[in-house]
Every structure is written in structure tokens, then in C-alpha cells.
Amino acid sequence: MINSQISRRNLLGLTAGAAAAASLAACGSSGPKSTTGGSGGGSASYWSLSGPPGQPYRQAAVDRFDSANPSTKITANFFANDDYKQKIKTAIGAGQAPTMIWGWGGGGLKAYVDAGQVVDLTDWFGQNAAVKEKLLPSSFGAATVGGKIYAMPVETVQPIVLFYNKKVFEQVGVQPPQSWGDMMALVPKFKAKNIAPFSLAGQSRWTNMMWLEFLLDRTAGSDVFNNVFAGKQGSWSDPAVLDMLTKIQDLVKAGGFEKGFGSVVADQNADQALLYTGKAAMMVHGTWSYGIQKANGGTFVSSGSLGWMNFPPVEGGKGDPTNTVGNPGQYLSISSKATSAQQDIAKKFFSTTLVDDQEKAGWVKSGGVPVLANSDSLYAGDDAQFLKDISAIASKAKVFAQSWDQALSPTAADTLLDNIAKLFQLQVSPQQWVDNMNGVIGK
């Protein structure tokens, strides 16, 4: 069971992430053709992400609910990650929110709360204590805004880790890195064998962000981003930020990523394919990548060729090497525009299907650590070691920080992602990056 502590940074990020989730909330009858159920007074709508490893288990939950409740169907639609983020914003802006809003909590959810777009679930959880007890306490931080709960934690705990291809390491005759210095030292060794040291889907921007999150934490600890989140002016001017940005550009200049990484899109999983085909040695990515590699990589995972670890420490850094970043869970909010009947369907979905044994077993089968408590006994078979290790990373982290783009407001997050892309393409200097980001603190 995961009992990771939530730092002030995480609590803030969770409140902030709520805004993003809120924007996701709105989709009515417009949009793509649904994959399940129909529309009408007896149905509720639900939008979420497509593709492996999650879609089959999201669909299975909807199917179970519909089977058990034939008069109250849920209509489900699924989209690729980046496409979803755009469509949900458009739908909410048009006043066509789905009944259930899938998101990452934090800053996005807070924006929804501030705009009155999602339902306060605090009293509902108070009246349904048995439901809350089935969920990891650590997952509620990103669902909470101003001390009130606005989302149901669902699916899995997803820290970011460093994946590596064991066969490639054996081929080159090197060991997995134990520090930032080791990582940099490995770059020329892999390049000499025409292997990309690190795979990166740079066009998606949030993939680049994971590098900055870890490097800043390992260099400075969590205080710097806490100050940013709290709206303290000039927080990005901390010397540790310039150090972190310089290190990233040093890695880019050294050829640390595959050629053309800036045009690679995460939704197509090309970055993961580079790792499991041996064209890249390492990849910093979320633990959901395990399920994708298992589904698409042939025998790569089952043969034991995939390795993983928490991001290594930085020499002389102040950050605790047990810290992690990522998603403490995923979240479903209920649109405030939904009818009472639709809200009741959503709440029944929350209190029955999303906390049943099949839901827990499904997410374990996907290669994920569920937000549902007491899942440890299900960690068996080929995935057992991965699940145990990820559970340990999450539970032992002194700080489990939420991803920056979900912790910050949508306005600040857009500026952040834009400047991160420019940083990796060497289009802005570290100082320019700092100046640009200081300009949106608190916005």
C-alpha cells in the first residue's frame, strides 16, 4: 500500500491541477461517435484517453457498469493525449461538458473549480466513507482545492522513472547510471555505437518537462518550485534553476537525444519504440510506459530486457534522491452542468464499478499500481517486480511532486511548455527562459 507524503508543493499542485481537470469536464452530445451506449435522459457521458495500456480497462469499467445498470448507460469517447487536451478545452468553453471530466487534478482542476464548472464532492465522500477508504490517502491531494474534494481519484499512481534497455547496456559494456555525471559520461559511449543515449518525444513538450522536474528537484530540492507555485515573484531566478537549465542544454549539445527528437510525438509512441528496438539506450518517462512497451514491444518486457530506476542524484545537489514526480493518480470530476440524473449515474459509477475488485485487478494487469488500496497481493507473475518497485518508489518518496504543467494554472503551464520546447531546441538561453517564466508567476 502506498502512503507517500504529500508536500506543500504537491498540495498546491493538486489544487492547481484541478483547474485543468475542470476544463476537461465539458462535452455533451457534440464530439466524436461514442464507443459505448447511447445518448438521452438515462445516460451520462464520459471522455478519456485512448490507446494502451489504459483504454481497454476504462472501456471494461463502462461495460461492467452498463451491464449492471441497463437503464442508465454511460456513453464513452476516447482520444489521444494531446488531442484530448485540446478537445476538452473546446468542449468546456462551448458549454458542452461531458458528465464526467477526466483529468490529472492540480492546477487544471483548480481552474474548473474557480469557474464553477465542477461539483463539490466533499459531502458525498463524507457520506460514503467506505468508498474513500478504498482509495490511497496520497491520491486525494490533487483532487482537493481549498480543503474541498472536487474529483474522484481513479486508475493508477504514476511516478516518472528512468527506463533503460539492458541488452544495449550489455552490448556497449557499460553499467546503468548512478548519478548525473554517469549519465553524461554514457552519452559518447552510446553515440560511438550509433545508439541514441536517450529517447525523447520532444514535440509533445511535456515529455521534455520531466527532465527539468527531476533535475531541479535533484539540484535544489522542492523549495524552488514551491515558491513558484505559491506565486512568489522572481522564484525562477534561483541559481539552481540556471544550473538545471544549463545542464539540460549541455546534454542536448552533447547529442544526448536521437536526431530529430523535436519532431517526435509522444502519442505515436515512437520514443518508446526506439527504446525497445535498441535504437536508444534510455528514456525518462511515466510508469504507464511499461504497459505500452509490454503491448507493443514483442518480447522486450517479458524477456527481462527492460530495466528501470528512480532518477539518479545530481552531484552536490540538495534534493533527496528518494523524491519523485509524476501523477499521484488520475481524476474524474462531475460537470456542474450535468443534470441531477446524470450526476447520480456518475456517483453510482464512482461508488460501485470504479472501486470493485475487477477494477483493481485490471489496472494491475495493465502494468500499473492502482490508486485502490491493498493491491499488493495482486502483484504476481511477470509484472510483479516492476509493480513492487514502483509501489516502493511512490511510498518511500519524501516528496511526490505533481507534474508542473498540471500543478500550474493553464496560462502559466502553456508558457512553461512553450519555453521548455525552445530550451531543448536551443532557441532560448537559460537566462531568457528564467525571464520568460518569471513573467507568468501567479497568473
Image: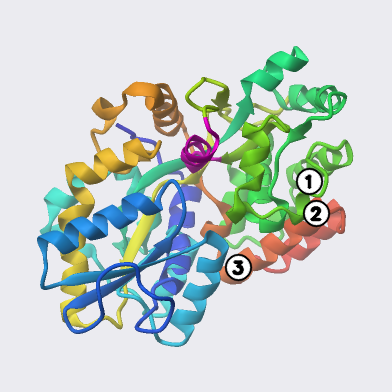
Instruction: Decide: few, some or many residues near mark 3? Use Cα within 10 Å; few <14, some 14-19, many ≥20.
Output: some
Picture coordinates of residue 360, whole percent (x, y): 25, 41
Residues in magenta? 286-298
**As rendered, which of 41 and 181 lies closer to the eye?**
41
Residue appearing at x 85%, y 55% in the figure = 431
- Is the residue under label 2 in contact with that under label 1 (CB below 8 Å)? yes
The residue that label 3 is drawn on is 442
Instruction: Decide: few, some or many residues near mark 2? Use Cα within 10 Å; few <14, some 14-19, many ≥20.
Output: many
- Amino acid type assigned to the residue bearing label 1 in the image: Leu
**As rendered, which of 156 and 123 lies closer to the eye?**
156
The residue that label 2 is drawn on is 423
Picture coordinates of residue 163, whole percent (x, y): 60, 31
The answer to whether residue 221 is visible is: no
Sequence-wise, the earlier of marks 1 and 2 is 1
Task: Find numbered disc 2 in the image and state the secondary structure of the residue it sits on.
Answer: helix
How many numbered marks appear?
3
Sequence-wise, the earlier of marks 3 and 2 is 2
**As rendered, which of 43 and 326 lies closer to the eye?**
43
Q: Is residue 40 above or below residue 162?
A: below
Residue appearing at x 39%, y 78% in the figure = 26
User: Residue 137, which numbered label?
Assistant: none
Q: Main secondary structure of the magenta part?
A: helix
Instruction: Decide: few, some or many residues near mark 1? Use Cα within 10 Å; few <14, some 14-19, many ≥20.
Output: many
Residue 293, magenta (yes or no): yes
